[in-house]
Every structure is written in structure tokens, then in C-alpha cells.
Image (cartoon, rainbow, N blue to C red):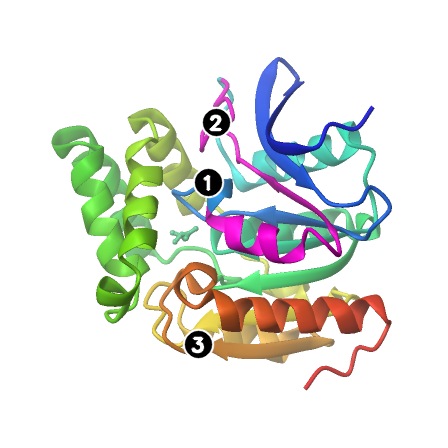
């Protein structure tokens, strides 16, 4: 029997996965994959906007939010495996994925390995390249500084890069919520995810094989994965559309939800009608 609502707990391989599942069981399914170091609640405004039309699932990646971390070494491939196990447990295929940043790394790898399970993709504020040596160095330094100075200081530093300058006056509530999400993470899960991100492989080489409609969105002020990284994916993915979200940094869905949701709904609506000519 399907369980519906928020904060449902499912045990897969002895680990609790926490997820939301809203909307009609027979409606097209969309799964939301959050960024690092956040959790599924970053998608609340999108879940609310779509649940009357779609079956909407948002889950906490292992070690984030209220999902167990387990003992395995974190990697993007492990996170992909977790996604596939969740889909199997819920008996889902023909799924549309909506992802942001780390969520995009997971979504792109999932579609590369299991293309038959997915029918459309939304990539927000993400990229298809691996970390540069300097990027890896920064991650390792971040792990050291979390151990030395604690999670709160790491949260304050992260927030400076996650949001557009104007959001610090216009999105006070969202910034507080994001800080809270980061502060609630354990030192161990933060460090293990940073290592997983630093070791991830590129997905650029397989982008031209993606055979489904893809909507790429990016905040105009995104400093972490800027417009140029979105353009690289757009040029490489055959059936892709690119939308720049004004008044937003790296967390476009939280910083400008009305424009983000407008593009999301329009894309999904046209996709559902099999009209892929999105303008
Ligand atoms: C995220 O938002 O998921 C992170 O910025 C991803 C990353 O650090 O590569």
C-alpha cells in the first residue's frame, strides 16, 4: 500500500530513507534530488506547486536531512544506487527527475546508467565536469576547517556563496532555513559528502546520448555553477532548453521560486503533452 504525505520513513538495506510523496498515484511522477549540504525541504515550494498535477516525491540523500548515513563510503554512484533502490521499493519507472547541483550530478549519472527508467530531466545550477585539482584542494581544506572550527562556521561561509547578494535582504527566511539545514548535518556526513564530490567523475562525455527533453536552469548570479557551465550542458544535450533565473544565485528555486516554478511547470506541461518545442 502506498503511503502519502511528508516525512515518510522507508527502510532499505537496513537504512532509513526519509521522503515526501504527494499527489495522485496515477499522475506522472517527478522525483526531486536536493543539493549539498541541504535536504529535501529545499524543494517545499516546488512540491506545493506541483502536487495537484503530478505525483511528487522528494527524498533526503543518505547522511542528509533525516535519512540514515550508513557505513559505506559515500560516492555519487552510491547515491545513484540509493535512488534506484528507492524507485524499486516504490515500484516507479518512467520518472522525471528535477535536480539541483549535487542532485544534478546524481541525476546525470542515473540517466547515463539507467536511461530506460527516466523520461525527462530538469537540471538546475549544476555542472557536468569533475572537480579541478584546485577544487579538490578546497574540499579537503573545508573538511579540515569543519573539524577545527565546527559546522556553524562552515554554514556561515557556505551561505555567502550559495545566495545572490540581493537575497541577503530579500530572502532572509530562506537563508535562515538553509543555514539550519547545514547546521543539522553531522561533521561525518559533511566530510564524507565533500570527499564524494571531490572524487566524482565527469558526465560531459555522455551528454549527447541523452534522449529525453531536458530543462536547464541557472541563477543569473550563481557563483558556484555559473551560466557558462549551464551553456556547456545546453550545447551538448540535443533536446535541451536553457533558462536563466534572474535575482538568484546558486539556489534558484529558493531565491526566485515564482520564475523557477513558471519554467518548471511550462516544461512539464509541454512534455506531458509530448510537445518538446519549448520557447
Ligand atoms: C551543491 O549545491 O550541491 C554543491 O554546491 C555542489 C558542489 O559543491 O559541487
Q: Give above or below for 29 relative to 260.
A: above
Q: Which mark is residue 227?
A: 3
Residue behind mark 1:
39
Q: Bin the neighbour count of mark 1 within 10 Å (Cα to Cα): few under 14, some 14-19, many 20 and up.
A: many
The residue segment tinted magenta is 42-70
Up/down of 49 relative to 217, above or below:
above
Q: Which quadrant, please, contains the N terminus?
A: top right
Whether the residue under disc 1 has CB within 8 Å of ligand 1: no
| Outermost bottom residue | 279
Give the residue number, with chain letter if any, for mark 2.
Answer: 66
Q: Residue at x 19, y 47 (%)?
A: 156
- Indicate the position of residue 84 as horizontal and vertical percent values: 71, 36
Task: Compare marks 3 and 2 and give the one earlier in the sequence.
Answer: 2
* Mark 3 or 2: the one toward you: 2
**Secondary structure under badge 3?**
helix
Q: Residue at x 58, y 17 (%)?
A: 15
Q: Are marks 1 and 2 in contact (CB under 8 Å)?
A: yes
Amino acid at each position: 500500500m502506498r503511503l502519502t504525505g511528508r516525512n515518510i520513513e522507508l527502510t532499505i538495506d537496513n537504512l532509513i530513507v526519509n521522503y515526501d510523496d504527494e499527489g495522485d498515484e496515477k499522475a506522472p511522477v517527478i522525483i526531486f534530488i536536493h543539493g549539498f549540504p541541504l535536504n529535501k525541504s529545499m524543494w517545499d515550494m516546488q512540491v506545493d506547486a506541483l502536487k495537484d498535477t503530478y505525483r511528487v516525491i522528494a527524498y533526503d540523500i543518505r547522511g542528509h536531512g533525516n535519512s540514515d548515513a550508513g557505513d559505506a563510503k559515500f560516492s555519487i554512484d552510491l547515491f545513484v544506487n540509493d535512488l534506484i533502490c528507492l524507485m524499486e521499493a516504490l515500484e516507479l519507472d518512467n520518472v522525471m527527475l528535477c535536480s539541483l547541483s549535487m542532485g544534478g550530478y546524481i541525476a546525470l549519472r542515473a540517466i547515463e546508467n539507467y536511461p530506460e527508467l527516466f523520461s525527462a530531466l530538469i537540471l538546475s545550477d549544476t555542472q557536468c565536469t569533475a572537480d579541478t585539482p584546485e577544487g579538490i584542494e578546497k574540499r579537503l581544506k573545508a573538511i579540515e576547517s569543519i573539524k577545527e572550527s565546527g559546522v556553524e562556521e562552515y554554514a556561515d561561509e557556505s551561505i555567502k556563496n550559495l545566495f545572490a547578494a540581493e537575497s541577503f535582504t530579500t530572502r532572509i527566511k530562506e537563508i535562515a532555513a538553509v543555514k539550519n539545514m547545514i547546521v543539522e548535518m553531522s561533521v561525518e556526513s559533511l566530510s564524507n559528502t565533500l570527499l564524494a564530490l571531490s572524487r566524482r567523475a565527469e558526465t560531459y562525455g555522455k551528454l549527447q546520448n541523452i534522449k529525453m527533453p531536458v530543462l536547464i536552469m541557472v541563477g543569473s548570479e550563481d557563483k558556484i555553477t555559473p551560466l557558462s557551465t549551464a551553456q556547456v550542458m545546453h550545447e551538448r544535450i540535443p533536446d535541451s532548453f536553457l533558462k536563466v533565473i534572474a535575482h538568484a544565485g546558486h539556489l534558484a528555486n529558493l531565491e526566485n521560486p515564482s520564475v523557477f516554478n513558471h519554467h518548471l511547470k511550462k516544461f512539464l506541461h509541454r512534455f506531458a503533452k509530448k510537445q518538446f518545442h519549448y520557447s
